[in-house]
Image: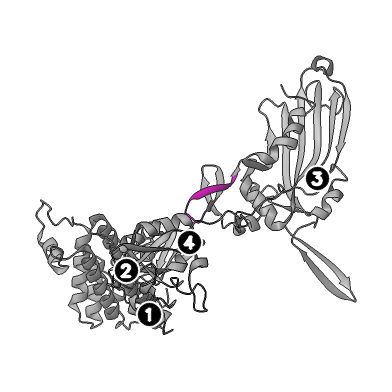
């Protein structure tokens, strides 16, 4: 049975509402049995306006109020138009309702500032919408949930938003309860109770059957508002106001005279720089070596991570400067590693190897970093050295990076010349394939198969069949994309059989097992592909290098095409 005096609700708003993990921002609720209905709404108010809004129990803002306002007026015979972000300047919304006056169902929405500030990502399933947050370690965390007539936010995000805005939260409530019993039966009396203090302003009414009692014999009604401030001493987690010391990994940066590993913290407070800081200590730019497996985590999740020429990043969260133009190892720099989240440092530490050099170091004389505070730049790839030390513009050298760079330029230049795409850019559903394309980091068949699959999507499946058919006056029976391209190149007098041979063998490789010791005997076309890519004698990394090199050559051949058509 509902308490018509609302003691439970009053206890909730005074003691529990702002302590729950999930805080209700908006709710319209009507119980199935019809004995309670409630409306809850929230907004943000500046501290200086709190006393003003607590002067009445009225709601200062309604969820259907617009987000902006435009007023017009006249001054000195000139029409003046004023734009306001909100209809009023006292209470700002977090939730608002987009109302379409019956031509479309109402839409519950969250103010865009909250979404953008935390880089929240929308997700929909069934009749529920939510927004989730990705932290620096790649973990997904629900931040906001919208379902039916209910909007909730995780307390940590609400507190942080209040902290950023330097505003208090105001909770509006309007609750009705009904009973089929009279006040005598309930042990209550008709009453009107008003509360007005530094945080609250609300009225509680208890009444019996009369013209205002809509259901049953008696009813209770509470309406008003309560203001909540940030907890005393609140520390921002999003902007790192938390004074908890950050943890740092130690990375192997050399080998001692007795063969032992020499490690040093990546905390830049203890690293040397070019201005005399911490002389004799390893430099901020000390190269640190890693096996190529360190990159697999990022290649395997291209929606969350991106690997580019000289950079690995978690999209929208952090980036790390790297040297990925060497074929044997990946390099980064001691100081930059210290700027990663600690869990990410641990990932890199698990792949940390000794420098590939015979330099002998001592923890006392720091020979590895020359002992004069200068890093060993001669350990970098030529690309990284020219860019980082000589400040020269330099193209990448790693085969996968070279091809990806060339493909993007090919899309643009071919279209500029001819007005159409002979190899179409990837669709949205396949757009992840190019950033994730790489030379396998181990001799795993599944990794090579994944890269071959991507190359076939990028090259074979993206051949612009429809435009080629128009230019050739149609296609022949059973003519597929590669054969169609071959016929077009012949028509264009571009004689390069190697191009078509590469595509045919690549497509064959896609549909066969790559086990070198497979029991099944390869068919004729499979034998050709095995021989073409030296599959039986080369590492999978070398096979992929061969594929990428041939693909790069293919782009050069296709750039010879000069057949204009109307832009697509």
Q: Which residue is tagged 1?
A: 385
Disc 4 to disc 1, how far (Cα)? Answer: 23 Å
Mark 4 or 3, closer to the camera: 4
Q: Which residue is tagged 4?
A: 340
Disc 2 to disc 1, how far (Cα)? Answer: 16 Å
Point 82% across, 50% down: residue: 50
Badge 1 marks a residue whose secondary structure is helix
Left or right, 139 with respect to 12, comes to left
Badge 3 marks a residue whose secondary structure is loop
Q: Is residue 421 visible?
A: no
What segment carries the magenta color? 135-145
Q: Badge 1, how many Cα within 10 Å: few under 14, some, many 20+?
A: some
Residue 59: image tag = 3
Of the residues under marks 3 and 2, which one precedes in the sequence? 3
x and y, in percent, of residue 241 in the image: 63, 57
Mark 2 or 4, closer to the camera: 2
């Amino acid at each position: 049975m509902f308490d018509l005096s609302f003691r439970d609700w009053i206890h909730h708003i005074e003691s529990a509402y702002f302590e729950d993990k999930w805080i209700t921002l908006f709710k319209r609720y009507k119980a199935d049995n019809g004995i309670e209905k409630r409306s809850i709404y929230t907004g943000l108010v500046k501290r200086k306006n709190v006393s003003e809004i607590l002067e009445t129990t009225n709601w200062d803002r309604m969820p259907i109020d617009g987000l902006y306002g435009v007023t017009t007026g006249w001054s000195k015979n000139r029409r003046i138009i004023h734009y306001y972000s909100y209809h009023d300047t006292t209470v700002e919304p977090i939730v608002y309702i987009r109302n379409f006056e019956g031509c479309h169902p109402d839409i519950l929405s969250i103010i865009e500032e909250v979404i953008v500030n935390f880089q929240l990502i929308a997700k929909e399933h069934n009749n529920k919408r939510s927004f989730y947050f990705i932290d620096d370690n790649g973990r997904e965390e629900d931040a906001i949930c919208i379902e039916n007539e209910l909007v909730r936010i995780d307390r940590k995000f609400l507190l942080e938003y209040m902290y950023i805005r330097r505003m208090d939260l105001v909770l509006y409530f309007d609750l009705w309860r009904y009973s089929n019993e009279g006040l005598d039966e309930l042990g209550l009396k008709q009453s009107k109770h008003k509360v007005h203090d530094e945080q609250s302003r609300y009225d509680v009414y208890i009444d019996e059957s009369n013209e205002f009692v809509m259901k049953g014999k008696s009813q209770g009604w509470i309406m008003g508002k309560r203001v909540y401030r940030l907890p005393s001493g609140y520390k921002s987690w999003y902007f790192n106001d938390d004074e908890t010391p950050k943890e740092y990994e130690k990375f192997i940066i050399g080998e001692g005279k007795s063969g032992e590993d020499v490690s040093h913290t990546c905390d830049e407070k203890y690293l040397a720089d070019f201005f005399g800081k911490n002389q004799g200590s390893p430099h901020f730019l000390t190269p640190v070596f890693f096996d190529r497996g360190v990159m697999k985590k990022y290649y395997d999740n291209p929606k969350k991570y991106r690997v580019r020429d000289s950079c690995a990043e978690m999209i929208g969260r952090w980036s790390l400067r790297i040297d990925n133009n060497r074929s044997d190892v990946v390099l980064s720099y001691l100081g930059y590693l210290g700027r990663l989240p600690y869990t990410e440092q641990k990932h890199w530490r698990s792949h940390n190897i000794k420098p590939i050099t015979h330099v002998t170091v001592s923890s006392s004389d720091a020979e590895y970093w020359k002992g004069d505070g200068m890093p060993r730049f001669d350990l970098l790839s030529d690309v990284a050295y020219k860019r980082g030390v000589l400040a020269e513009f330099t193209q990448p050298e790693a085969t996968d990076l070279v091809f990806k760079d060339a493909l993007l330029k090919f899309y643009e230049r071919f279209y500029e010349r001819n007005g159409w795409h002979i190899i179409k850019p990837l669709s949205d559903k396949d757009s992840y394939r190019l950033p994730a394309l790489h030379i396998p980091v181990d001799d795993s068949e599944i990794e090579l198969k994944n890269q071959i699959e991507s190359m076939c999507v990028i090259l074979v499946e993206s051949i612009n069949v429809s435009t080629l058919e128009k230019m050739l006056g149609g296609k022949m029976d059973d003519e597929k994309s590669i054969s169609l391209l071959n016929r077009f190149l012949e028509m264009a007098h571009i004689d390069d059989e190697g191009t078509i041979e590469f595509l045919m063998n690549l497509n064959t490789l896609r549909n066969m097992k790559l086990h070198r010791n497979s029991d099944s005997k390869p068919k004729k076309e499979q034998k050709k592909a095995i021989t073409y890519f030296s599959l039986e004698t080369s590492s999978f990394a070398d096979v992929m290098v061969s594929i990428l090199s041939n693909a790069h050559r293919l782009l050069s051949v296709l750039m010879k095409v000069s057949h204009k058509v109307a832009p697509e």
